Image (tube, rainbow, N blue to C red):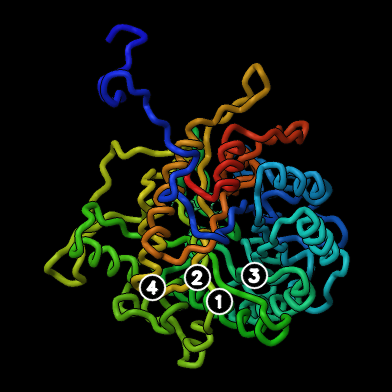
Amino acid sequence: MPAGRTPEILSRGPGKAVTTQPPTSVDRRFPDGFRWGVATSSYQIEGAWDEDGKGPSIWDTYAHTPGNIRNDENADVANDHYHRYEEDVALMKSIGAGAYRFSIAWPRIFPEGAGEPNPKGLDFYKRLVDELLAAGIEPFATLYHWDLPQALHDRYGGWQSIETAEAFAEYAGYVTAQLGDRVKHFFTINEFRSFVEGGYQAVDVEVGGKTIQLGGAPGLRLSDSELRQVRHHTVLGHGLAVQAIRAHAPAGTKVGFAENIHVAVPVIDEPEHVKAAEKATREENAGFMTVMLEGRYTDAYLAEAGGTPKFTDDELKTIASPLDFVGINIYRPGLYVEPSDEPPGYREIPVNASHPKMQSSWHLLDPEVMYWAPKHMQSIWGAQSIFVTENGCAAADVVAEDGRIYDSDRVMFLRACVGQLQRATSEGVPVDGYFLWSAQDNFEWIWGYGDRFGLIYVDFETLERTPKLSADWFREAARRNAVV
Ligand code: GBH
């Protein structure tokens, strides 16, 4: 086609200009009151690992042990957020975030895991929350994002023992009573699946010619039956914490979990296939989400290798304590299924080697998970308030000569994901907010500082922060409350 000519498909007959759409077509908007937030976690950004009376966590210990983290990095300083939180809140405001999901480091509050609280640790979160509220950013706090007090690991073997679940509830009751005047939404535990499977049954992985353990702290290699008991203690810890929060936090405090849903995606959007995907999602999450929402382990889960975990009916009731909302972290498809005439009524299908990926080695790309995950939460468990507590991707970000960071691949990823989320809300799926992972580049666990997930670029030499192109995209989406 000669340059300068309007392609046939764009012209509306002779002489008529192409009519441009209004800035946001109504059908791409989210419901009123939808929250646009960003997320982080304590160990990944705070630094100040031994300041103001903080006790060590299992992640301090793990990262200080050579060979555990790619390139032997640690988060002793990380983003130095502990000292730069005012700047970080201002940056969040400038990129248009209306909500912020952060986590509280348990060993700052109880350096020994239990017993005497440390007022200076608590004070940091009070100052942070005051700063957020002054900036018009709504705080959402996660109580456990994997940085278990080392003392509890030494004393009880961490989540291997019920004592850790009980200590978690005590900490949850205390900290929500202290912060409940200014924080209205709490998440108990972040990604049960990731820290349990990864931390308590580690497996080796080859990275750049060396072998490291996939998963992370505490880096144990338990048997299947031991692992099943650990899972049980974490969901019990969640349930006990919910009860402690109801007992001690101010009335009206809202609580839920934040789990990485292992979501089954139907390849074909047709009722039989969708039903197969719902069955698979329920079974795939049996040890965590399903028991928290149903108060029972599925028969298939109880029959699996490793035997039945030890539990009582009372514990099951506690585990399924009523919640105000559910939080789901959504990054990748968990599995693809098709219907089957054989029990259990679905069949997992292999993932093609050519399946597209984002930068992290585990990060298979399929934006439709942002549609199916909340949709399944509603259709399987009748969820009435859903938050997407994390979604985002790592990208190979570099600072261009003009000083900017052109992460067009992240913009593509976000637009596609948020588009599918909007498809769900437009069908009436009750999603009340979206938290992008992450506010800033940070310490990505065993992968160290290589996998950048931020809307804001961080130079880890100077700790200078620079919003990326994707931050512009986020600000505009939040401003219009729509897919842009
Ligand atoms: C979340 O985990 C975390 O909550 C957050 O702290 C983290 O920084 C962020 O997402 C980005 O990773 O068996 O190959 O899938 C993300 C999900 C689950 C990814 C466990 C890695 C193990 C490797 N993670 N998964 S694999």
The answer to whether any part of residue 375 appears in the image is yes
The mark nearer the N terminus, 2 or 4, is 4
Residue depicted at x 75% and y 31%: 461
The kind of residue tagged 4 is Ala
Distance CA(mark 3)–CA(mark 4): 23 Å
Q: Residues within 10 Å of mark 4 (few under 14, many from 20)?
A: many
The kind of residue tagged 2 is Ser
Of discs 2 and 3, which sits in the foreground? 2
The kind of residue tagged 1 is Asp
Of discs 4 and 1, which sits in the foreground? 1
The mark nearer the N terminus, 2 or 3, is 3
Distance CA(mark 4)–CA(mark 1): 21 Å
Q: On screen, 295 above or below 48?
A: below
The answer to whether any part of residue 206 appears in the image is no
Most distant residue in the left direction: 341
* Residue matched to label 3: 186
Q: Which quarter of the image is occupied by the N terminus?
A: top left
* Residue matched to label 2: 385
- The kind of secondary structure element at disc 1 is loop
* Residue matched to label 1: 324
Residue 304 located left or right of residue 110: left
Q: Nearer the viewer, residue 201 or 240?
A: 240
- The kind of secondary structure element at disc 3 is strand
Residue 427 located left or right of residue 471: left
Q: Residues within 10 Å of mark 1 (few under 14, many from 20)?
A: some
* Residue matched to label 4: 286
Q: Position of residue 372 (x, y in %)?
A: 35, 58
Residue depicted at x 17% and y 72%: 343
Residue depicted at x 46% and y 48%: 418
The mark nearer the N terminus, 4 or 1, is 4
